[in-house]
Amino acid sequence: MKRLPSKQKGASAIVTLIILVVLGYGVYIGIQYVPQMIESKSIDSVLNSVKDAHKTDRIDSVEEARQRVINLLQINEMNDMTDSFDVKQRDGKVIITFNYDRELNLIYETKPMHYEKTLSLN
């Protein structure tokens, strides 16, 4: 009859399973959050491009600003965001506002994520 070793060498199956579950949950959240982060950074890039264009080619009308944003969204293949922005003129300033919602599914609850970004062109 063989005797089992008295000291365990390595992790138990339960500890390994817990580590894999925690790692899997992190990947699950990351798969949802990373695209939202990339989308948010792309919107920042669009607004920065409009701001830089305003420095060289003065953007004075609402329609001109709207067309620039639409063109930049099409270049970035973000056509679904065309309904998420608004361009207004207030006190001689052109104001571009992106306002959209996304959801982050945490398994035990769905967390709404609200994004709002504003650019004011003087």
Image (cartoon, helix red, strand yellow):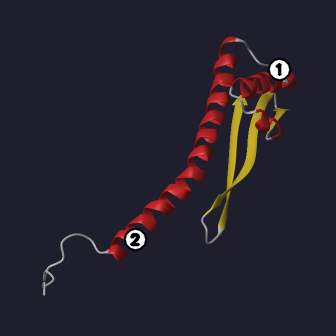
Please give the residue where the numbered disc 1 appears in the rendered image.
64
> Does the residue at mark 2 contact the one at mark 1 (Cβ under 8 Å)?
no
Q: Which residue lies furthest to the top in this view?
A: 56
Task: Decide which of 2, 117 is in the foreground and name it.
Answer: 2
Q: Is residue 40 above or below residue 106?
A: above
Residue type, label 2: Leu
Q: Indicate left or right for 87 with 58 as reference.
A: right
Q: In this view, does 38 lie above or below 33?
A: above
- The C terminus lies in quadrant: top right
- The N terminus lies in quadrant: bottom left
Q: Where is residue 54 in the image (x, y as percent from the top left)?
A: 70, 18
The quadrant in which residue 87 appears is top right
Residue drawn where x is 75% and y is 45% of the image: 99
Residue type, label 1: Glu
Q: For mark 1, does the 10 Å Cα neighbourhood hold few (<14), some (14 to 19), or many (20 or more) residues?
A: some
For marks 2 and 1, give the CA distance. 57 Å
Please give the residue where the numbered disc 2 appears in the rendered image.
17
